[in-house]
Image: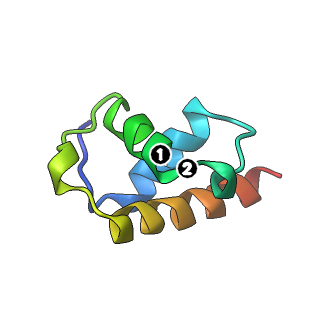
Amino acid sequence: MTYGWNDLDDIAIALAEKYPGHDPLKVRFTDLLDWVLALDGFTGKREESNESKLEAIQMAWLEEYREQQ
């Protein structure tokens, strides 16, 4: 399965699985960007990223994080 910047739920689930227990609100956007780019199946490019996309990913991941608590 592949996904890109607009697949927020897929990214959030992948981050929650790869980084269990990490509070998304404590992850710097520079680290979040690197983590997203390193996800298996992620096809987006660094230059396509922006602050609003990273914030949306962070909020989607936060929902996943809270569900796991």
Q: Residue at x 45, y 60 (%)?
A: 57
Q: Considering the numbered disc 1 on the image, is that residue within a helix, a strand or a loop?
A: helix
Q: Residue at x 26, y 36 (%)?
A: 1
- For mark 2, does the 10 Å Cα neighbourhood hold few (<14), some (14 to 19), or many (20 or more) residues? few
Mark 2, residue position = 28
Q: Nearer the viewer, mark 1 or mark 2?
A: 2
| Rendered view: 41 above or below 24 | above
Q: Nearer the viewer, residue 1 or 18?
A: 18
50 left or right of 27 in image: left
Residue 39 percent coordinates (x, y): 37, 32
Q: How many marks?
A: 2
63 left or right of 41 in image: right
- For mark 1, does the 10 Å Cα neighbourhood hold few (<14), some (14 to 19), or many (20 or more) residues? some
Residue 67 percent coordinates (x, y): 73, 58
41 left or right of 27 in image: left
Q: State the image quarter where residue 41 is shown.
A: top left
63 left or right of 45 in image: right
Q: Residue at x 70, y 41 (%)?
A: 22
Q: Considering the numbered disc 2 on the image, is that residue within a helix, a strand or a loop?
A: loop
Label ID, residue 61: none
Mark 1, residue position = 32
Residue 53 percent coordinates (x, y): 34, 65
Q: Amino acid at mark 2?
A: Arg
Q: Amino acid at mark 1?
A: Leu
Is there CB contact under 8 Å for labels 1 and 2? Answer: yes
Q: Between marks 1 and 2, how big is the CA–CA gap?
A: 6 Å
Q: Residue at x 23, y 50 (%)?
A: 4
